[in-house]
Image (cartoon, rainbow, N blue to C red):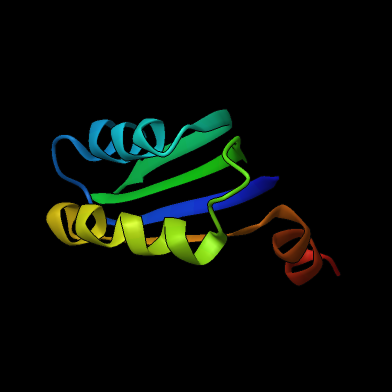
């Protein structure tokens, strides 16, 4: 399954490292990534492939909560189909 993960918040050292390490621990492959920093505000959008079919979006979201708390980021994940439907005009 393909999903979209967004990471947003104040910039700090190690955000990318901590997020990508957690994804690797879950056997989630990063297919595409975009990140930017503007006026001290960090934003990253990742298109990821969930290789372990036993992991649900909700389980991944729960796993990412400690990373979000530690990095002081808001981390959200949703299926690519849902993301696309919500962002089409």
Picture quadrant where residue 26 is located = top left
Q: Nearer the viewer, residue 79 or 87?
A: 79
Q: Seen from this angle, which residue lies furthest right? A: 89
Against 25, is 77 above or below?
Answer: below
Q: Please report the residue visible at 47 percent of the width from the left and 32 percent of the height from the top.
A: 27
Residue 69 falls left or right of residue 85: left
Q: Quadrant of the C terminus?
A: bottom right
Residue 56: percent from the left, percent from the top?
56, 59
Residue 63: percent from the left, percent from the top?
33, 56
Q: Seen from this angle, which residue lies furthest front? A: 54
Residue 14: percent from the left, percent from the top?
17, 35
Residue 70 falls left or right of residue 44: left
Residue 66 falls left or right of residue 36: left
Q: How many marks?
A: 0
Q: Please report the residue visible at 33 percent of the width from the left and 55 percent of the height from the top.
A: 64
Q: Nearer the viewer, residue 11 or 66?
A: 66
Against 2, is 58 above or below?
Answer: below
Q: Nearer the viewer, residue 30 or 40?
A: 30
Q: Please report the residue visible at 60 percent of the width from the left and 35 percent of the height from the top.
A: 51
Residue 54 falls left or right of residue 66: right
Against 42, is 76 above or below?
Answer: below
Residue 24: percent from the left, percent from the top?
39, 30
Q: Please report the residue visible at 70 percent of the width from the left and 45 percent of the height from the top.
A: 1
């Amino acid at each position: 399954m393909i999903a979209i993960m967004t990471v947003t918040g104040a910039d700090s050292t190690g955000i990318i490292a901590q997020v990508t390490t957690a994804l690797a621990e879950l056997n989630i492959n990063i297919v595409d990534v975009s990140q930017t920093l503007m006026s001290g505000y960090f934003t990253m959008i990742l298109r990821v492939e969930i290789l372990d079919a036993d992991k649900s979006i909700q389980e991944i979201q729960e796993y990412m909560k400690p990373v979000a708390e530690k990095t002081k980021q808001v981390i959200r994940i949703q299926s690519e189909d849902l993301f696309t439907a919500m962002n089409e005009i």
